[in-house]
Amino acid sequence: MTRMAASKARQDFSETLNQVAYKGKRILLHRRGKDVAALVPVGDLALIEKIEDRIDLEEAEKILADMESGRTNPIPWDQVKKELGLEP
């Protein structure tokens, strides 16, 4: 992965974007030596989102199985709202 100052990416934005979009480069942007963002091809982003969705689905299935087996009890919606400060 290429590391680049955010200011350099801003100066050469078209070229930086082309490197990511057409050559598949991944670019890690930093500001004052601290990593702040990454530019990745759209295909990489789609893969990351699929992985996140799968993790979320597996966790939801686990929670539902725990509830169905009685290992976990659901929290009433009114209690959730109260704990989050969503009720007056």
Image (cartoon, grey):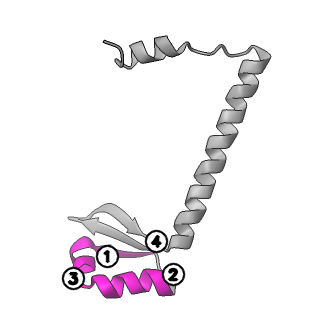
Q: Residue at x 65, y 36 (%)?
A: 59
- Percent x, y of residue 32: 20, 64
Cα–Cα span, label 3 and label 1: 11 Å
First in sequence: mark 3 vs mark 4: 3
First in sequence: mark 1 vs mark 2: 1
The label shown at residue 24 is 2
Cα–Cα span, label 4 and label 1: 13 Å
Q: Which residue is mark 3?
A: 11
Q: Which residue is mark 1?
A: 4
Q: Residue at x 57, y 14 (%)?
A: 75
Callout 1: helix, strand or loop? Answer: strand
Is 80 left or right of 52, judged from the image as shown? left
The magenta stretch is 1-22
Cα–Cα span, label 1 and label 2: 16 Å
The label shown at residue 40 is 4
Disc 3 to disc 1: CB gap under 8 Å: no
Callout 4: helix, strand or loop? Answer: loop
Q: Is residue 30 magenta?
A: no
- Percent x, y of residue 69: 79, 18
Q: Amino acid at mark 4?
A: Val
Q: Residue at x 31, y 76 (%)?
A: 4
First in sequence: mark 2 vs mark 4: 2
Nearest to the eye among marks 3 and 1: give it: 3
Q: Amino acid at mark 2?
A: Gly
Q: Say above or below: 43 vs 80.
A: below
Q: Say above or below: 7 vs 83.
A: below
- Categorize mark 3 by other alpha carbons within 10 Å: few (<14), some (14-19), many (20+): few
Disc 2 to disc 4: CB gap under 8 Å: no
- Percent x, y of residue 31: 23, 65
First in sequence: mark 4 vs mark 1: 1
Q: Nearer the viewer, residue 30 or 50?
A: 50
